[in-house]
Image (spheres, helix red, strand yellow):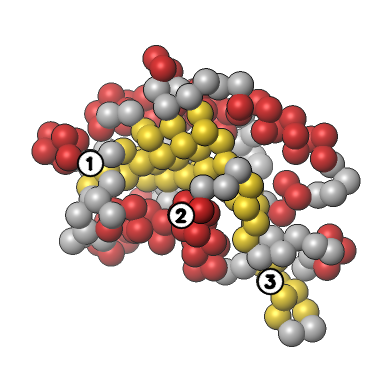
Amino acid sequence: MLLPVTQEDLRNAPHALVVGGTGMLADVSGRLLREGWTTSVVGRRKDRIARLAANNAHTRGALHAISVDYRTTDAFIRTIEAAIAHAGPISLAVVWFHSVAPAAPIALAAALTQDGARCRYIHVLGSAAADPAAPATNDARRAKFERHAGLRYEEVILGFVRDGQRTRWHTSDEIAAGVNRAIDMGEARSIVGNVEPWSDRP
């Protein structure tokens, strides 16, 4: 499902992509819309897409809603390519993928950098990406993305929160706030919350 974006929208705004932008990254989508981005948002649930549209009906940016299941990689990439053809090259991608779709993140990186396009790619990852027992795995992941010329690859790792004597995972609001900070900071790797000591994970 593609909501209409006018030619005036396309002339006046850069194009961003948010995968997971109707769930825990909804506030990231909203921030980009408020800043005037044409924002393509991928979500599988049409009710969440409708809620995001209603909550951001009066922002400066244009919402380009995409209802697709990224677990089917080929269909997902075709839909992203259609969004690029419709709204122009994507210069900022903020993406969260569940582990059930391991091929989707790197396939997206390739699609975003076709024909010499350049894109800032912010990859939101679970705490396992900071596992001190798997540095080689984490280095190999980054290397796969950095092979793509034109891709500025950044990682945002979701850690945990210390809450008195216990620890817990972040709420969606906390995650979105952390990702928004990462957008502002532009660091190669940032951590939302804590990942040390590793044994303290909830």
The correct choice, above or below, for 16 with respect to 108 in the image is below
Amino acid type at image mark 2: Asp
Closer-to-camera residue (132/87) = 132
**Between disc 2 and disc 1, whose residue precedes?**
1
The correct choice, above or below, for 118 with respect to 12 in the image is above
Q: Marks 1 and 2: in contact by CB < 8 Å?
A: no
Q: Residues within 10 Å of mark 1 (few under 14, many from 20)?
A: some
Residue wearing tag 1: 13
Amino acid type at image mark 3: Val
**Of helix, strand and loop, which one carries label 2?**
helix
Query: Could you tell me which quadrant the N terminus lies in?
Result: top left
Query: Which residue is situated farthest in the top direction here?
Result: 115
Residue 118 % position (x, y): 42, 27
Query: Could you tell me which quadrant the C terminus lies in?
Result: bottom right
Residue wearing tag 2: 184
User: Is residue 194 toward the left or the right of residue 87 in the image?
Assistant: right
Residue 107 % position (x, y): 54, 25
Residue wearing tag 3: 161
Q: Nearer the viewer, mark 2 or mark 3?
A: 2
**Of helix, strand and loop, which one carries label 1?**
loop
Q: In which quarter of the image is residue 7?
A: top left
- Residue at the image point whose x is 52% and y is 43% from the top: 122
- Residue at the image point whose x is 37% and y is 54% from the top: 29
- Residue at the image point whose x is 33% and y is 28% from the top: 89
Q: How crowded is mark 2: few (under 14 residues within 10 Å), some or many (20 or more)?
A: few
Amino acid type at image mark 1: Ala
Residues under labels 2 and 3: Cα distance? 21 Å
Residues under labels 1 and 3: Cα distance? 36 Å
